[in-house]
Image (spheres, rainbow, N blue to C red):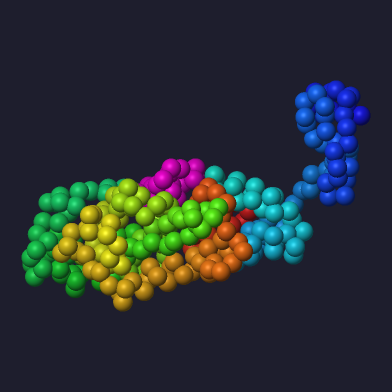
Amino acid sequence: MNCPSCDESHIRKNGRKSGKQNYICVSCGRQFIDKYEPSRIYSNQMKEECLKMYLNGMGFRGIERVKGVHHTTLITWIKQLGKMMVDAKSQDVHEGELSGDVYDGLRRSNNPGDRNNSDDRNNPGDRNNPGDRNNPGDRNNSGDRNNSGDRNNPLVGELDELETFVGSKKNKIWLWTAVNHFSQGILGWVLGDHSAETFKPLWEFVSSWQCYFYVTDGWKVYPQFIDSGDHIVSKTYMTRVEGENTRLRHYLARLHRKTLCYSKSVEMLKYSIQLLLHYLKYRSIPIFS
């Protein structure tokens, strides 16, 4: 028997792994077993079933017990999908795409514009002046936007943070989310700490909505970005974003409260959120469907 790495014959027994004899090469230190099982090939249907189970609240080990697919295989599938989704065009934003850095989850509009641009908001103080989008006070205007606004340009935005951890409870991380008060779905999100630096890229996207109001829970970061006249601090009016965050906790085992499941890397948490948001909107797995 020779080492598969250096082809040396000086090898020793080194315990057993999963009931099989394990060997170690004295020359290079490579550990190996005598005979490896051939790689299993899974059908697209099996992949889709396993990933749907994952996106409906089951952990990797639970899926392994039910379907017989090793948990590391499931992790590999999710990483592959996550990387593909980062590189792919966003399916629900015109001429926008998902970035691969801290901006993951942010949908960039075609023309974010300047909040103080006179073309976008000529007279925000005159709420009784008739007109189109230049007068946000005219809610009965029959122009381009109805009373609730279109999905990607909300009239009222809600912002919130979902707390979780990576590795241990000492390593806290926050998922910042932004939603339209009048419609379902998370429009933008970012992962990071609880600071203004993390929130800044999300706000650069959200500010392009030019909402009448932004509703938050009063966290000290928000007043640094949102004008006091446009800012509403009230948990009462945050039912939409709180509901969306609750759905994330419900559908991802790693976000459950009081659970044995947790995230071991920011990368897997990011990919899982990307995949879940796609699944909640389209009810399909993006690659295998």
| Residue 121 figure quarter | bottom left
User: Is 37 situated left or right of 241 in this image?
Assistant: right
Q: Which range is magenta?
A: 86-108
Residue 63, given in percent of the width and then of the height, sits at 70, 62
Residue 170, given in percent of the width and then of the height, sits at 49, 55
Q: Which residue is farthest bottom?
A: 236
**Picture layout, residue 84 above or below residue 257:** above
Is residue 150 in view?
no
Residue 274, given in percent of the width and then of the height, sits at 50, 54
Q: Quadrant of the C terminus?
A: bottom right
**Picture layout, residue 2 above or below residue 206:** above
- Is residue 229 magenta-colored? no
The residue nearer to you, when weighing 257 against 251, is 257
- Name the dominant secondary structure of the magenta segment: loop
The residue nearer to you, when weighing 139 against 163, is 163
Residue 12, given in percent of the width and then of the height, sits at 88, 32
For the point 17% across and 54% down, which residue is it?
A: 120
Q: Which residue is farthest front?
A: 170
Is residue 163 in view?
yes
User: Is 212 situated left or right of 194 in this image?
Assistant: left
